[in-house]
Image (spheres, rainbow, N blue to C red):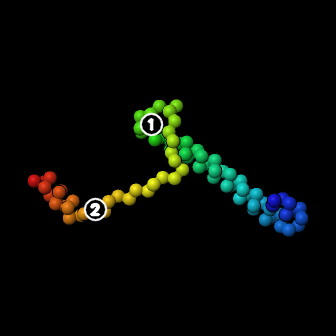
Amino acid sequence: MAEALLKAGKVTKLDFLRSDSQVIDADQTIVQARNNTILAKTILKKTMGLRDEEEIDIPEETTKISPEPLDELALWEKAKEKKL
């Protein structure tokens, strides 16, 4: 697309090179993200004690779980009980 615009004289050579550079950067980011996913899965398998050849499935979307709000007073009382 950008090359066609360059040939038609609609964009400058500088604009063309910038857009080409942005595409290359985006491709590199995708490769890096895929490699990070492979690394994260490998670390997860090792942590879980699974063999490398075992497959794990991580859904695209995960449910975010928020922790319960802490009751600081109850925690303080519990800590004092354990010290006694």
Identity, as a three-letter code, of the amino acid under mark 1: Lys
Q: Across the whole image, how many numbered discs are drawn on residues? A: 2
**Mark 1 residue crowding within 10 angstroms, few (<14) / some (14–19) / many (20+):** few
Residue name at image x 10 percent, y 53 percent: 84
> Hey, which residue is sitting farthest right in the picture?
8
Residue 10: image quadrant is bottom right
> Where residue 26 sits in the image (x, y, percent)?
67, 55
State the SS at label 2.
loop
- The residue tagged 1 is 46
Q: Residue at x 78, y 65 (%)?
A: 15
Which three-letter amino acid code belongs to the residue tagged 2?
A: Leu
- x and y percent of residue 72 in the render? 24, 64
Residue found 86% across the figure and 60% down from its top: 4
In which quadrant will I find the N terminus? bottom right
Residue 46 appears in which quarter of the rendering? Answer: top left
Q: Label for residue 70?
A: 2
**In whole angstroms, how far apart are the C-alphas of marks 1 and 2?**
32 Å
Q: Nearer the viewer, residue 37 or 13?
A: 37
- How far across and down, in percent of the image, does residue 34 sit? 59, 46
Residue drawn at 21 percent across, 59 percent down: 75
Mark 1 or mark 2: which comes first in sequence?
1
Q: Is residue 24 above or below residue 5?
A: above
Would residue 2 be found to the left or right of residue 75 on screen?
Answer: right
| x then y, percent, for residue 11 | 83, 67
For discs 1 and 2, the disc positioned in front in the rendered view: 2
Residue 29 - label: none
Tag 1's secondary structure?
Answer: helix
- 10 Å neighbourhood of mark 2: few (<14), some, or many (≥20)? few
